[in-house]
Amino acid sequence: MRHIKGLSKETLKILDRIYQESKYYQVRERAHCIKLSFQGYQISELIKIFKVSRNTIYNWFNNWDSESLAGLYNNPGRGRKTTI
């Protein structure tokens, strides 16, 4: 099973702050998932907590590994495009 490892105290504080204060629900959810994984929760438990698929959890972990805190946020261009 895959876990998030090696988070510093500063990173944990930032994740806590994001989880409590971010205006974006998805970002709060992802930050919480990263923190729970670091605390030792299994992927099967995270799937039940967040009600998402295994692939979604792995995508969150991959984004965290490649982009760290920036990986919590959605990339631009997602969603409906603006009309004139």
Image: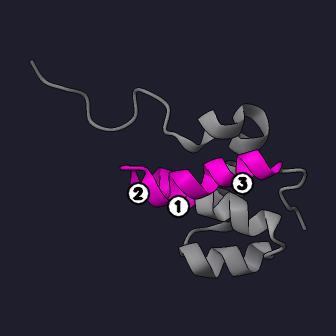
The residue that label 3 is drawn on is 12
The number of numbered badges drawn on the structure is: 3
- Determine if the magenta segment contains residue 45: no
The quadrant of the rendering that contains the N terminus is: bottom right
* Magenta segment main secondary structure: helix
**64 or 39, nearer to the observer:** 39
The residue that label 1 is drawn on is 29
The residue that label 2 is drawn on is 25
**14 or 38, nearer to the observer:** 14
Q: Secondary structure at mark 3?
A: helix
Q: Position of residue 15 (x, y in %)?
A: 63, 52
Q: Position of residue 50 (x, y in %)?
A: 56, 73
Q: Residue at x 58, y 44 (%)?
A: 72
* Marks 1 and 2 in Cβ contact (< 8 Å): yes
Q: Residue at x 49, y 38 (%)?
A: 74
30 w.r.t. 62: above or below: below
Q: Residue at x 52, y 58 (%)?
A: 19
Per the model, the C-alpha gap separating discs 1 and 3 is 14 Å
Q: Secondary structure at mark 2?
A: helix
